[in-house]
Amino acid sequence: MNNTRLDKILRFIADQIEGPKGNWHFVVQDIQFICLTDELHNRMRIISPIIEHKDMSKDDYYRCMKANFHSAIDVKYAVSGKVLWAVFMHPLKELTTPQVEDAIHQVFTAVKTYGTSYSSLNLYFPTDEDRKRYLN
């Protein structure tokens, strides 16, 4: 993968897109995304803002951290600046087209499920509490 190929993929998927290669701002349905790359250091991230962290409760923080381990799968919830983000990071060169599509889907889902299931896919890794319930 490189910026030229990624640009073609993003332009195909996005409803709206702007910005130069390596710093795209785009929209899929009603969700805003940013895709940042660094070809020199072989890094790529797709991120989407969710909420200002001042509007989060302690329970929201806890549920995000729990989701990062059990239900956010390849996406993580992270705070940068004053915002909670859904974040997907990957080496750029090794990235495939299906992985880009999946990353956008997972970030989209993580944003949409914030406040409910805090998940990026239907896949879920059980918690200790889940295992105890099944064993009793």
Image (cartoon, rainbow, N blue to C red):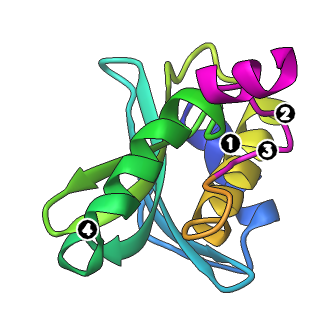
Label 3–label 2 contact, CB within 8 A: no
Residue 79 left/right relative to 124: left
- Per the image, the residue denoted by label 2 is 98
**Closer to the eye: label 2 or 1:** 1
Residue 90 left/right relative to 71: left
Q: Which residues are magenta?
A: 119-136
Residue at 64%, 43% (x, y): give it: 6
Residue type beneath disc 1: Ala
Residue at 76%, 53% (x, y): give it: 105
- Per the image, the residue denoted by label 1 is 103
Q: Is residue 83 above or below residue 72?
A: below
Q: Sequence order check: which comes first, mark 3 or mark 4?
A: 4
Cα–Cα span, label 4 and label 1:
20 Å
- Per the image, the residue denoted by label 4 is 83
Q: Is residue 99 magenta?
A: no
Q: Which x, y percent locates residue 93?
A: 56, 17
Image quadrant of residue 61?
A: bottom left
Residue type beneath disc 4: Val
- Per the image, the residue denoted by label 3 is 121
Q: Label 2: few (<14), some or many (≥20) within 10 Å?
A: few
**Closer to the eye: label 4 or 1:** 4
Q: Is residue 113 above or below residue 80?
A: below
Q: Which residue of the protein is positioned furthest toward the left in this rendering? A: 81
Cα–Cα span, label 2 and label 4:
28 Å
- SS of the residue at dot 2? helix
Q: Is residue 129 magenta?
A: yes
Cα–Cα span, label 3 and label 2:
15 Å
**Closer to the eye: label 1 or 3:** 3
Residue type beneath disc 2: Pro
Image quadrant of residue 125?
A: top right
Q: Sequence order check: which comes first, mark 3 or mark 2?
A: 2
